Image: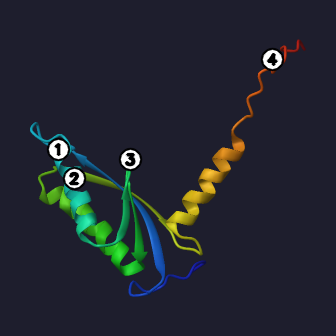
Amino acid sequence: LWYRLEPLTSPMSLIADIQVVPSPTGTEADCFKHVNAAIAVITASGLKHSVGALGTTVEGRADAVWRVAREAFDACLKSGAEKELMYLKLYRGDHTVSELEESGAAAAAAARPVARPDHRPAAASRA
C-alpha cells in the first residue's frame, strides 16, 4: 500500500466534516428531523464539534470520530429516512480545528482588496 493506516484504536486525533443527506430530510411536522437525529448523536458523543449550515465538524480520537460518523449515519435511518447519503471529509495532521480556521480566516483577510477612495477601474484594453 502507498499509505499506512493506523488502527482504529490509535490515540491520534482526527478531524471530520460530516454532512448527512437523508431522503427525505425530515417530516411534514419537522423538515429536518432526520438531519437533527444525526446532530443529536454527534452532540451526545461528547466530542468537540461545531454544527454548521452544511455539515458538522468533529474532532477527537480517531476511533471515536469514526464511531460517531457511523452512528450519525445510522441515526438518520433509525429516525425514518428512507435513504441516506453521507459526505465525509477527514483530516489527520499536525493542526487542530481552531488552527485551521485561524489560518483560513487570515488567508481570507489577506486576499481582500484594499478600497481606495480615488481608485478607478482600469479601462479595458482593446486587442
Query: Where's residue 79, x and y in %?
Result: 12, 55
Binning the other alpha carbons within 10 Å of mark 3 as few (below 14), some (14 to 19) or many (20 upward) gives few
The N terminus is located in which quarter?
Answer: bottom right
Q: Nearer the viewer, mark 2 or mark 1?
A: 2
* Label 4 neighbour load within 10 Å: few <14, some 14-19, many 20+: few
Of labels 4 and 1, the one closer to you: 4
Choose mark 2 or mark 4, whichever is in front: 4
Q: Which residue is mark 4?
A: 120
Within 10 Å of disc 2 (Cα), the crowding (few <14, some 14-19, many 20+) is some
> For the residue marked with disc 2, what is the amino acid?
Asn
Residue at which label 2 appears: 36
The earlier-in-sequence mark between 2 and 1 is: 1
Q: Is residue 89 left or right of residue 93?
A: left
Amino acid type indicated by mark 3? Leu
Whether the residues at callouts 2 and 4 have beta carbons within 8 Å, the answer is no
Q: Is tag 3's residue or tag 2's residue first in the polypeptide sequence?
A: 2
Q: Mark 4: which secondary structure?
A: loop
Residue type pointed to by label 4? Arg
Find disc 3 in the rendering and name its residue: 54
- Element marked by disc 1: loop
